[in-house]
Amino acid sequence: MFTFSNYYLATSIEDAYLELMKNKKNIILGGTSYLRMSNSHYNCAIDLSHCNLNYIKEEKEYFHIGAMCTLRDLEINLSLNKYFSSVISKSLEFILGVQFRNNATVGGSIFSKYGFSDLIPTLLILDTEVVLFKKGTMSLEEFLETPMNLKDILLEIKIKKDSKRAFYKTVRKSSTDYGILNLALSLDENKKFKISIGNRPGKGILLYNLMNHLNSNLPLNEDILKDFINKISFDDNMRGSKEYRNLLAFNLLNNIFKEELNCY
């Protein structure tokens, strides 16, 4: 259980940021769902629930999703799930239960850069940007490389609207457990691939070597795919070994390429 000495209900983003900067042990609260797994103590917990960040807005070129939007909001939004083969909804439906997804927020999931995140690998294969209060707009991939102790506030994410076909695959010991491995793949109208993998158990990454091979129209078969998979960094944790994750990654991608996309 996490604890804190003080609680602050911010009335605006500016107000929240000023409070955040007063002490290095001050923290922004999202849904706090994953914080409950830790034993950390913070000086002041800052609540953004009165800062009007709970929204999904569809505009001409982008979806704008506020940081306080819940995972359940994403999962059931009809406009959002008309795009990208409903991949966002598919990547969220096995995260614990509906009650949990009604509490966990987009901002909390992304800003914390959880290695077990189902959402981050999915957003990586789309054209996703994050909007920070001080550092402004950057790609999700660029944000994932920022320091973990970054003192800023995530305002929203932006997803570019396009006609990508997208796939999400995960393996879990049970339907509501954390994933052992998850991966996502998209293919745009120009036949260009984006492929990501998460729960290695490290944070989600794009598989540039494999993407560059496919996007150069070079041949693909099971042996070539296996060589690319062997270059990915996997590790062990309580849910699976690195060898098991290697096998899962190969089989999940192989099934997409062979059965869904007829690549070989």
Image: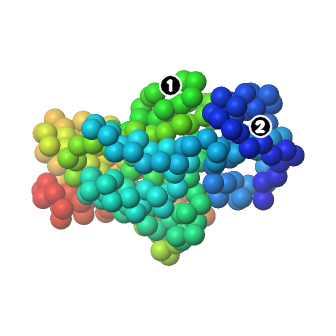
Residue hosting label 2 = 26
Task: Tell me residue 88's x, y (percent).
Answer: 37, 56
Q: Is residue 16 above or below residue 176?
A: above
Give the total of numbered labels: 2
Identify the residue at image location x=34%, y=50%.
229
- Quadrant of the image for the C terminus? bottom left
Identify the residue at image location x=49%, y=32%.
131
CA gap between label 2 and label 1 equals: 21 Å
Task: Tell me residue 75's x, y (percent).
Answer: 42, 61
Task: Tell me residue 239's x, y (percent).
Answer: 56, 65
Q: Nearer the viewer, residue 197 or 254?
A: 197
- Quadrant of the image for the N terminus? bottom right
Task: Tell me residue 173's x, y (percent).
Answer: 50, 73
Q: Residues within 10 Å of mark 2 (few under 14, many from 20)?
A: many
Note whether residue 226 is visible: no
Q: Quadrant of residue 21?
A: top right
Identify the residue at image location x=13%, y=54%.
263
Note whether residue 63 is visible: yes
Q: Which mark, residue 136?
A: 1
